[in-house]
Image (tube, grey):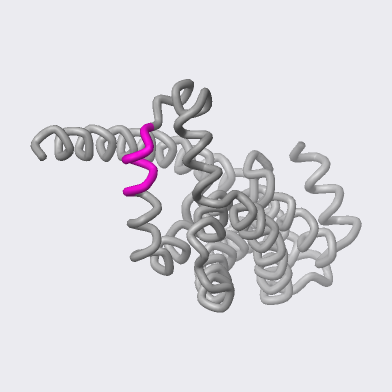
Amino acid sequence: MEQMIVHLVEQFGYAGIILLIALENIFPPIPSEVILTFAGFLTTCTALRVWGVILAATIGSCIGAIVLYFAGHLLKRERLMKMIDGKVGRLLHFKREDVELTLDWFGKKGRKAVFFCRCIPILRSLISIPAGMSGMAMGPFMAMTAAGTLVWNILLVYLGAFAGASWDIVTKYMDTYKNWTILALAAAIAGCIVFFRRKKKKK
């Protein structure tokens, strides 16, 4: 996959970056770290410019985020609850109360969540779905998406430019960051489920 990403960025420049980052937002397994750090490196030896790459990546992120936002918007809360009450919920061990609490929390803290999650691997893509489901207004959603994504893009593009030909070393550190983030998220989710269930039992 990395070779394909490198080839597309080399071949199509800014347009390739927009396409790849848009796809990365829709399909999280595509690594934005590789795209952005390699593009950052190319700014040191090609006609690509740092802020051009950052702008292209931000546009791509917003395009991908809009797709997932509307996917979440189509998945109405009532439909999700039916899925949770059915086989999907039993398979994943999700309970209606836990999901409702999560959606209610997102309704209150959605803007901050969208902003900060744009800098967290995996969640930076998936956060668009609950935003659409909760009916978050498009204006604030796009503003927080663009702002959070800009921070992520600036960091990785400049790291790639700074590392130069050794840009792939940055991706290895980012892989470590991603792995620890996934473990932390899993622990946090498990902790929240335990907390809400104990709270419910006390009531």
Name which quarter of the figure residue 181 lies in.
top left
* Left or right of 11, for residue 171: left
Q: Which of 175 and 107 is in front in this view?
A: 107
Residue located 51% across and 47% down the image: 78
Q: Is residue 63 left or right of residue 113?
A: right
- In the picture, which quadrant includes the C terminus? top left
Residue 58 against residue 92 in the figure, above or below? below
Residue 92, placed above or below residue 62 = above
How many labels sit on residues? 0
Per the image, is 100 magenta?
A: yes
In the image, is residue 61 part of the stretch drawn in magenta? no
Q: Which residue lies furthest to the left in this view?
A: 202
Magenta region's main secondary structure? helix
Whole-percent x, y for residue 45 in the image: 78, 64
Residue that sits furthest to the right in the current view: 11
Q: Nearer the viewer, residue 107 or 57?
A: 107
Q: Which residue is drawn at the image coordinates 66% and 59% (left, top)?
A: 70
Q: Which residue is drawn at 22% across and 39% down?
A: 196
Span colored in magenta: 95-101
- Looking at the image, residue 85 sits to the left or right of residue 35; the answer is left
Instruction: Name above or below for residue 182 compared with residue 135.
Output: above
Quadrant of the image for the N terminus? top right
Residue 86, position in %: x, y? 50, 27
- Of residues 26 and 72, the one nearer the viewer is 72
